[in-house]
Every structure is written in C-alpha cells, then in structure tokens.
Image: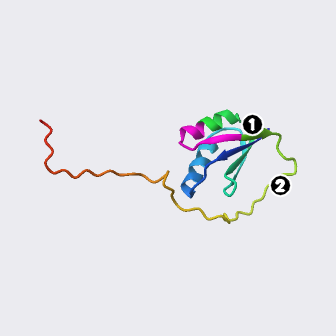
Amino acid sequence: MKKIVLKVSILCSKCKVCILTTISKFEGIVSIAVDVEKSTVTIVGVVDAVLIVKALRKAKKPAEIVSVGEPDKKEEKKDDKKEDPCKLPPCCNACRPVMIWQDEPNICTIC
C-alpha cells in the first residue's frame, strides 16, 4: 500500500472529472482524494505512480509526483457525501472546444 500525492492543474469541473476518470481506471486503488485549492490528488493503493502520471499526461493533464510514501494509519472512511466547498467553473479555456468556420462561397477545387 502506498500513498501517492500528485500535483495536477485543476481549472474547472470538467478537468476534475477527467482526472478522476483517468486515475480510477487503474486497478488496486483504495481511495482518491482531490484538493482543488492546492491542486493536488492523493491516491492510496497498490499502483505505480509513474503509470498514473503517464496516463494523466496522455489525457492532456500535466501532472508531477509530489510524494510517495506509506499511508496514514489513522485514516477514517466517511460515508457522508458533502458537496465541494470550492466552486469550480463548468469549463475552462483548456477544455473548451474550438470551432473554426471559413465562409468562402466561391471555392474552386479544380484550380
């Protein structure tokens, strides 16, 4: 069992969902905690930190390893689901799709 702390850029709620879905695909993870204010993700489980960072970078979410160590023994599981006190915008500029429109009525493909 390892406790892995990663620094990840979390700009909006779409970024947060993308990060959580990318990390949750790995087997052996016991818990995932996201701290939006500090832009950190804490993962507890039997998983390789380098593989998680590679998967996050592949998903266009730059990440770096802050620490890898033993998990806290005093960690208590809470079943109370609370809403995030930190409100994130629904989408940031990095997640927003870009559409380019070219309006040229007389395009000749033969010339």
Quadrant that contains the C terminus: top left
Q: Where, by quadrant of the figure, is residue 62 drawn?
A: top right
**Residue lying at 25% horizontally and 50% vertically, measured from the top left:** 102
Q: Was residue 62 drawn as part of the magenta stretch in this picture?
A: yes
Report the coloring of the rendering. Answer: rainbow
**Residue lying at 70% horizontally and 34% vertically, measured from the top left:** 48
Is 94 displayed left or right of 78 in the figure?
left
Q: Look at label 1 and name its amino acid.
A: Val
Q: Within 10 Å of the Cα at label 1, are there few (<14), some (14-19), or many (20+) other Cα atoms?
A: some
Number of numbered discs visible in the structure rendering: 2
Give the image location of residue 106, x and y in percent: 13, 48
Give the image location of residue 78, x and y in percent: 78, 59
Q: Was residue 88 drawn as part of the magenta stretch in this picture?
A: no
Question: Which of 101 and 46 lies nearest the eye of the viewer?
Answer: 101
Q: Look at label 2 and name its amino acid.
A: Glu
**Residue lying at 70% horizontally and 36% vertically, measured from the top left:** 49
Identify the magenta region: 55-65
Q: Distance between the Cα atoms at labels 2 and 1?
A: 18 Å
Residue bearing mark 2: 76
Tell me the element at label 1: loop
Give the image location of residue 100, x and y in percent: 32, 50
Give the image location of residue 87, x and y in percent: 61, 65
Residue bearing mark 1: 46
Position of residue 97 relative to residue 83, above or below, is above
User: In this rendering, does residue 2 appear at all?
Assistant: no
**Residue lying at 67% horizontally and 33% vertically, measured from the top left:** 50
Position of residue 48 relative to residue 14, above or below, is above
Position of residue 58 relative to residue 9, above or below, is above
